[in-house]
Amino acid sequence: MWQRGPNGWALTPQKCIKNWTEEDKAFLASYFQKKCMREGSIAYGAFCKEKLVAFSLLETRPLGEQHAYFNLLGLFVTRNVRGQGLGTQLFQKACRSTQAWSKAVVPLREPR
């Protein structure tokens, strides 16, 4: 993940969990559900035979001085369905959403 530090931007390693336990999945589902309800984030999912196999979570609150950025909180694809383009489709859906939201956002300016 790119993070800004005292010496500028740097790519920092992040932990990647490859084998999620049922407890891990339950925790994340609860966390993301609360985040969506509390902060207005939105989730997109991909299903196979009524089972969630991929999802993304996107904050709907714009960031930055010009309100031009949105935070993609996560993009997860189950191992056995990787390579089928689900992650790409979910990412593109998130991008299209932010483009629509950006047009509706009027940047706030500080009073003079």
Image: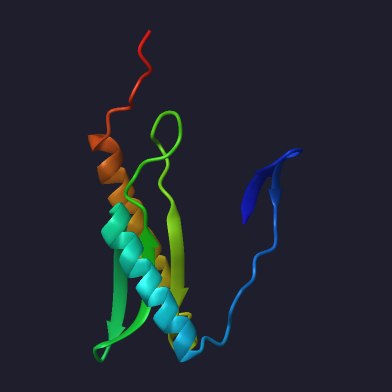
Lateral position of residue 104 relative to residue 39, left or right: left
* Residue 1, horizontal then vertical, whole percent: 62, 57
- Image-quadrant location for residue 19: bottom right
**In the rendered view, would you say 100 is above or below 66?**
below
Identified at 40% across, 47% down, the residue is: 70
Percent from the top left, x then y, of residue 96?
30, 52
Residue 77, above or below 32: below
Residue 6 spot, x, y in % from top left: 74, 38
| View extreme (right): residue | 7
In the image, what residue occupies the spot 31% across and 53% down? 39
Q: In this rendering, would 47 be left or right of 87?
A: left
Report the residue at 46% width, 87% height from top. Answer: 23
Up the image or down, 32 lies above or below 99; here it is below
92 left or right, relative to 19: left
Relative depth, front residue between 79 and 106: 106
For image coordinates 29% across by 82% down, the residue present is 47
Is residue 50 or residue 40 the one in the foreground? Answer: 40
In the displayed structure, 107 sits above or below 86; it is above
Is residue 51 visible in the rendered image? The answer is: yes
Q: Residue furthest top?
A: 112
